[in-house]
Amino acid sequence: MSAFKTDNFGDRIRNAATARKAAAEKFRAKTEVNEKVLAEREAARREIAAAREARALERKAAAEEKRAREALEQAERDAALKAEQAAREIEAAAEAERAAALEAERKLARDARYAARKARK
C-alpha cells in the first residue's frame, strides 16, 4: 500500500487556483454560447416585432382605404338618390302642368258648350 499522501499548503493553494480557473473557463464558455444564443433570439424577436408592426400598418391602411371607399360609395348613392328625387320632382311638376293644361282645356270646352247653349236660346 502506498503511504498516506499529505499535501502541503502550497499544493492545496495551487489545486484550488487550478479548479477556480477551470470553473471560470467553463463559465466563460457557457456565457459566450449563451450570449450568441441570446443575441440570435433577440434578433429573431426584433424581426417578429417588425413584421407584426408592418402587418398592423397594413391592416390600418386597409381599414382607412375601406372607410374611404365606403364614404365614396355612400356619396355616390346619395348623389344618385338626389338626382332621382330631382327627376321625380320634375316629372311631378310636368304632370301637374299637364293636368292644369287638361283642366283648362276642359274648362274651355265646357265654356264653349255653355256659350253655344246660350246662343241657341
Image (tube, helix red, strand yellow):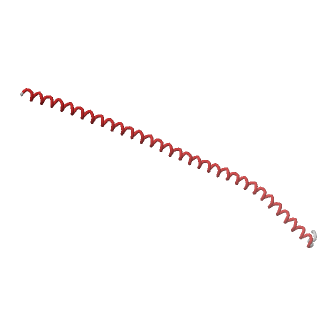
Q: Could you tell me residue 121's position as x and y percent? A: 6, 28
Determine which quarter of the picture holds residue 3.
bottom right
Above or below — where is 37 with respect to 100?
Answer: below
Q: Is 79 displayed left or right of 103 in the figure?
A: right
Q: Is 91 displayed left or right of 18 in the figure?
A: left
Q: Could you tell me residue 50's position as x and y percent? A: 65, 50
Residue closest to the far top: 120
Q: Give the quarter of the figure containing the N terminus.
A: bottom right
Q: Residue drawn at (93%, 69%), measured in percent from left and top?
A: 2
Name the one closer to the observer, 57 or 17.
57
Name the one closer to the observer, 59 or 16.
59
Q: Could you tell me residue 107's position as x and y percent? A: 18, 32
Residue closest to the far front: 119
Q: Residue drawn at (24%, 35%), measured in percent from left and top?
A: 100
Q: Is residue 53 visible?
A: yes
Above or below — where is 66 with respect to 35?
Answer: above
Q: Residue drawn at (83%, 60%), measured in percent from left and top?
A: 25
Q: Residue drawn at (59%, 48%), measured in percent from left and top?
A: 57
Q: Could you tell me residue 71's position as x and y percent? A: 47, 44
Above or below — where is 97 with respect to 54?
Answer: above
Q: Is residue 4 visible?
A: no
Q: Is 110 displayed left or right of 24 in the figure?
A: left
